[in-house]
Image (tube, rainbow, N blue to C red):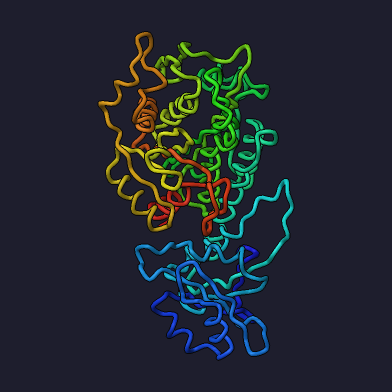
Amino acid sequence: MPHALLATSAENSLPIWLVTESTWANTAQQLPKSAQGFAKAQGFEGKAGSHCLLPDADGNLHGVAFGLSDDAKQRDPFAVGKLPAILPEGLYRFETDAPDAALATLAWLLGSYSFDRYRKRAEKSVRLVVPKGVDAEDVTRIAEAVFRSRDLVNTPTSDLGPDGIEAAARKVAEAHGAAFTSIVGDDLVKQNFPMIHAVGRASATAPRLIDFTWGDENAPRITLVGKGVAFDTGGLDIKPASSMLLMRKDMGGAAATLALADMIMGAKLPVRLRVLIPAVENSISSNAFRPGDILNSRKGITVEIGNTDAEGRLILADALALADEEKPELIVDFATLTGAARVALGPELPPFYTDDEDLAAEIARTGLEVNDPVWRLPLWVPYQSQLDSKFADMNNTGGPMAGSITAALFLRRFVSDAKAHVHFDIFAWNNANRPGRPEGGEVQAARLMYALLKKRYAS
């Protein structure tokens, strides 16, 4: 079913004219005199991001003019995503064609999102008539998966610890009939996931490895791995207070993984899907793992702990080793892994890493197509030496520079048999409101991977 904010009938809908500074004058001439005069009095010129509510002769709302950039290369495909928050209640339609109708419809839905678990907000129904040719059900599927995962990232750890991440994953799995298991606490040691256990054992809530599978066993195997650190104090190498304020989002990789899995299963893509989420809280107590400890891993690689705040790669390593054992066609991992990625590319452009040249090109292209941009950084082998250890096979931290690259090189050591592997180092947060992307938790790179997998397998 299409989302409640989407309508299939244009009856009683109000028009939205999408204009630019160069097209506004021609569009204005086709409007009633009352609307033309009001727009002129308001100084509306069609500038990108500006809008004008246009009245009829009786003072009622006749329609809306909304400005887009004249330069197509500078135009935000999600620009109309700001409208649901600023328009009066009602049903609207695009009177002029949106440059990309599907993305505009998705932006409308994504821009309507609000997180109201702890503070109720006034409800407002600003609905859109689905443009011709747009698959309303697919747009709805994507938006609802993003909403659920944004909610997860926004929820504080007081209400979403490792057990809460498991409950959320179970809910997604059961909604699609997936087979679900979870390995909890000391059973992680018994079943050879020593690094997941070590990172999470200091928390009052036991660490766990969430695992669910879906689809035909003979279909191409796609495995998703998501970093599920419910909160990261930094462990004994404790973070400063300012760096802990957003650590609720350190499970953003798990949230992105669940969003992608939700989309794949909802669309019934012909794949054999496996989802692995190591869920822990990196806390401090008498049994916390320590700097200088040497941990074994599922892969048999020993890891010296250079810093307990580089914990995400440790739990991912055990999960990736398990994923690799099935030799899947593709392993995709999502993780809020490094601050270095933000220094390099900022919060809006996550880096990704893969050795597969064709896959890299497809990811970059698809990200631009669906307005879920990412940027490839190199798996620069000479930097591998930064992970050297005098006492173990490797250290969990590199040098003071190229931190995102050395983290990706660390993870690559635990994948040897999969046909392809891609790692996304995401931020999972919007620092400010942008069209279609309200401030708060965000799902990055999941939409692009869904579009990519649809192109590969839906046909």
Judging depth in this view, the residue of 269 and 23 nearest the camera is 23
Please, is residue 355 above or below residue 268 in the view? above
Judging depth in this view, the residue of 279 and 458 nearest the camera is 279
For the question of whether residue 433 can be seen, the reply is: yes
Which residue is rendered at x = 61% and y = 48% of the image?
A: 148
Residue 129 placement (x, y as % from top left): 58, 73
Judging depth in this view, the residue of 349 and 353 nearest the camera is 349
Judging depth in this view, the residue of 85 and 102 nearest the camera is 85
Q: Quadrant of the N terminus?
A: bottom right
Please, is residue 11 above or below residue 182 in the view? below
Q: Quadrant of the C terminus?
A: bottom left
Which residue is rendered at x = 43% and y = 38% of the image?
A: 425
Which residue is rendered at x = 65% and y = 64% of the image?
A: 4
Residue 184 placement (x, y as % from top left): 62, 24
Quadrant of residue 230 within the rendered picture: top right
For the question of whether residue 329 can be seen, the reply is: no
Please, is residue 256 above or below residue 60 in the view? above
State the residue lying farthest toward the top.
Answer: 391
Residue 75 placement (x, y as % from top left): 40, 64
Residue 255 placement (x, y as % from top left): 55, 41
